[in-house]
């Protein structure tokens, strides 16, 4: 999947197979990577990749009801991925050694802009990410991380029939 240039990532049509291929390493059956093989990695772009991959795996029937899914890393990609999987009622566990999700941003005084990396494309100055959930507006990293972490935990609590906590604090060797 080439990094989008002129279009907003959420506006691109529906190439489910491309989204899966972009996250797959040949021979790594059942293992998917978000952004590893991509040119542009931003907070927003990782969230979009997470939404796309979960949608593609779900709609293509690669994920089946009652499948268990491990998500490694509680950054933008992992938190979005785990929340989306939970919403679709998959049995998901998120693994991260940190005490809280979104560690990289949670102490950051840097401004986080959802679309500025697409400048000068139309919409690149929009201050809202415009995502279906775990949405956020232009701000510094700390308040964004705090808000999104709170939403993530709220979704964890409201997840149906959850037998174990969504997040496990440990490092995973892949
Ligand atoms: C200094 C700096 C400034 C940046 N500024 C911006 C900016 O202004 N705007 C912007 O959009 N983006 C910015 N970025 C990029 C942005 O931070 C990344 O795009 C985003 O964090 C990627 O999210 P991610 O979930 O893919 O990875 P990460 O946020 O890196 O999250 C990965 C997570 O995986 C966990 N992990 C790692 N190894 C393991 C393991 N073995 N087992 C379990 N868990 C593991 C880590 O603890 C971490 O929580 C910046 C990055 C840096 C470093």
Image: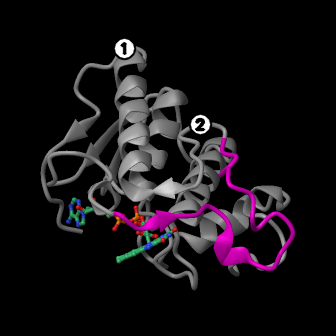
Q: Name above or below for residue 171 compared with residue 94.
A: below
Percent x, y for residue 87?
Answer: 52, 29
In the displayed structure, does residue 145 sit left or right of residue 134?
A: left
Which residue was labeled with disc 1? 161
Q: How crowded is mark 2: few (under 14 residues within 10 Å), some or many (20 or more)?
A: some
Q: Name above or below for residue 73 compared with residue 89.
A: below
Residue at position x 24%, y 69% in the image = 174
Which residue was labeled with disc 2? 133
Q: Name above or below for residue 45 compared with residue 149.
A: below
What is the number of callouts on the image? 2
Q: Circle 1 sits in a helix, a strand or a loop, which is it?
A: loop
Give the position of the N terminus as an image quadrant.
Answer: bottom right
Q: Name above or below for residue 41 compared with residue 165.
A: below
In the displayed structure, does residue 152 sit left or right of residue 18?
A: left
Residues 104 and 107: in front is: 107
Q: What residue span does the magenta drawing correspond to?
A: 109-131
Residues 164 and 6: in front is: 6
């Amino acid at each position: 999947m080439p990094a989008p240039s002129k279009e907003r990532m959420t506006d691109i049509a529906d190439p489910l197979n491309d989204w899966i291929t972009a996250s797959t390493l040949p021979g790594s059956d059942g293992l998917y990577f978000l952004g590893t093989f991509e040119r542009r990695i931003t907070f927003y772009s990782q969230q979009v990749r997470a939404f796309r991959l979960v949608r593609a795996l779900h709609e293509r029937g690669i994920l089946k009801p009652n499948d268990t899914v491990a998500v490694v890393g509680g950054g933008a990609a992992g938190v979005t991925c785990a929340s989306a999987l939970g919403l679709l009622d998959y049995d998901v566990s998120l693994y991260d050694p940190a005490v809280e999700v979104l560690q990289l941003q949670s102490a950051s005084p840097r401004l986080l802009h959802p679309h500025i990396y697409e400048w000068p494309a139309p919409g690149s100055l929009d201050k809202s990410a415009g995502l279906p959930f775990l949405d956020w507006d232009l701000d510094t990293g700390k308040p964004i991380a705090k808000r999104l972490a709170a939403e993530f935990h709220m979704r964890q609590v409201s997840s149906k029939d959850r037998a174990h906590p969504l997040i496990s604090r440990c490092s995973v060797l892949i």
